[in-house]
Each structure stands twice: as C-alpha cells, then as structure tokens.
Amino acid sequence: MNELVSVIMPCYNAAEFISEAIQSVLKQTYSNLELIIINDGSTDSSEEEIKRFNDGRIQYFRQENKGQCAASNFGIARAKGEYIKFFDADDVLGEGHLEAQMKRLDGSKTVVASCAWGRFYDGNPNSAKFIPESVWKDMKPLDWLKAALTQKYDMMGAWVWMIPAPLLKLAGGWDERLSLNNDFEFSIRLLLHSEEVLFADNAKFYYRSGLTHTLSQVRSKKRFEEGILSTDLGCSYLLARDSSPEMKRICANRYQEWVYASYPYYPDLELKLEKKIAELGGSNRPLAGGRVFRILTSIFGWKAAKRMKVYMQKFGLKKLPLN
C-alpha cells in the first residue's frame, strides 16, 4: 500500500483557513501524496498563505476565476496519483484519514472508500461531533445513495470519497455548468460507476460550517438554476438505474427542498419544480424549522410561515426561534 494519492484542493478566497487545511494534508500518516492547489482567482491573501509552505509535495497553480468544478478538473488533468482525493480549502483532515481509506481500498480500482465526518462551527476542529449515519458501513452504491438521500440531512460532498483514478476517468470529471449542489450530481455519477462503497471508520473528516461566503449561502437565481440542474442530472441517473416508487419519492423530496429554498424569491422556479414533483408522484418532505416555525406552519401553512421568516430576517430579527 504505497500508491501515490493526489489531493486536489480548489481555493477561492480561503486565506483565513487554507493554512490549517494544507497542514492537515502534509501531516498525514500516509506520506506518499501530492497536494495540488488550484487558486481559482482569489482576491484575498490566499496566495501568500499558500506560498508560506515549502514542501516538495505541493503543486501550486493559479487561474482566473472559473468556479470550483473547473478548478477541480484542472487538478485532475495534472494529477499523477493512482488515487484521487478532493478536499476543500476550509476543512481539515484527521491525521490518519488517507491511510485509513487506502487500507480499506487495498489496491482496488473499482470501488470507493467513504469516511466518518463531523461538523464544527467555532473554528476548533476538536469540537466536531461525529454522529453515526446509516451509511457508515460497507454498502452497494445504489443502497448507499438510497440510504443517504432518505436521512434527515444527506451529505454528498465529494470529499467523502477516496477514488481510484481509473474509476474517476470512467465516471468522468466535474460538470462545469454547475456550482451550487455540484457534489450531488458528481457523487451520484461516481457511485453508480463503482462496484461498492467501503467505509473507513478511522478516516476522520472535520467539516467547517457556518461560513457566510459559501455557495450554500448564495441566493442568486443563476445559482438556484445551477443547483436545480444538478438535481435534474443526479435524479436522471438514479431513475435510469431504479425507477421504483421509492426512488421517485426520493427525487420528489429533493425537488421539494428546492421549492422551500426558492420560495418566495423565484415563483417561476417554484412552479416548474412543483410540476416535476407531481410527475414523480408527490413529496412527503416537510419544511424543517424550529418549534415556533412549526407552530406557525400548522396554523398558517408553510408559505405564510416562510414569508414571516424572510421578513424577520430582512429586518435583522434572526435570533427569533424560527430556524
């Protein structure tokens, strides 16, 4: 077990966090790696932070801003490793992460390895809580996808996977039309080309949350449309493999999340989404929220409750228990 691992790290305005991310890669117990950092047109001091490191395993590139998918594909084209690991510039790898995933793969080129992950908000990775999920075990890819997408919160980040390079070539790289929700399409396509998902219990991943600049916080119509396109593509792959009522409900529920997210901002998108949901047989996904929000929803309906929430947030009343 000494194959080269290519860690691909796109970076856009991550100066505050990227040093910690880089250190977590360089400190891996599995040392046969290359770290490919693609600065995707950052306007902050990310480049200065990256250049502080003097390690021959680092390859640094800078390009004009083209998006995470284009940056990831840039990295793939330059990767020499037999295995590929995608890694965001604001997260942290546990020291034994790569070693644990490589042990599980044991040289296989037809399966992927997954990992355990914990979320932290306060800048301290040690505060992350690792809450076991139904997919934290060895599974067939379609079973993994069904289980993940029926959990309360699915985690489809590409950083979950250790990917054999031949499998990535077979599945294809990143769709550069996408930004928001791009991991959804990529991970589904990758897993449906894989024979199995092997869980590496000792591969710890520390996921930084609460950042206001992340794509998940963006509400532009273009980003919403890209996110919905990713859902269209991912669900088309799933339904081509399994068109059962269960899978149709899974996809309908995914579209329902976009209805909740886009209302009341983009009524035209909402109408298109509701048509897709009806064609799939309907959704049973409720709108998540706190106790007060649930009470308002039960009295006035979810749309009125959502309008109240948006109005309160607009006027800075974010601390009310509506989330």
Image: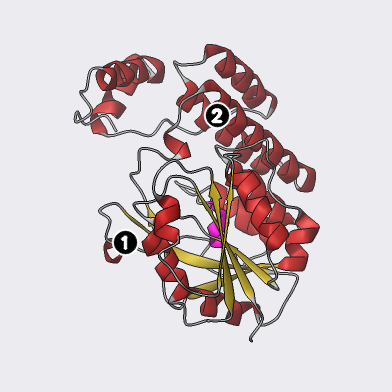
Look at the image and give the residue range highlighted in magenta.
156-161
At 63% from the left edge and 18% from the top edge, which residue is drawn? 272
Residue type at tag 1: Ala
Left or right of residue 136: residue 110: right
Label 2 to label 1: alpha-carbon separation: 29 Å
Residue 142, picture quadrant: bottom right
Residue 99 to residue 179: above or below: below
State which mark lies toward you, 2 or 1: 2
The image position of residue 208, as x and y in percent, is: 37, 53
Residue 94 appears in the figure: yes
At 30% from the left edge and 17% from the top edge, which residue is drawn? 299
Task: Let me know if residue 272 is in the magenta part.
Answer: no
Residue type at tag 2: Arg
Q: As rendered, which of 185 and 197 lies closer to the eye? A: 185
Disc 1 is placed on an element classified as loop
Residue 243 appears in the figure: no
Left or right of residue 303: residue 282: right
At 29% from the left edge and 15% from the top edge, which residue is drawn? 311
Tell me if mark 1 has few (under 14), some (14-19) or many (20+) residues whose alpha carbon lies within 10 angstroms of its own. some
| Residue wearing tag 1 | 128
Tell me if mark 2 has few (under 14), some (14-19) or many (20+) residues whose alpha carbon lies within 10 angstroms of its own. some
Residue 245, picture quadrant: top right
The image position of residue 222, as x and y in percent, is: 57, 24
| Residue wearing tag 2 | 223
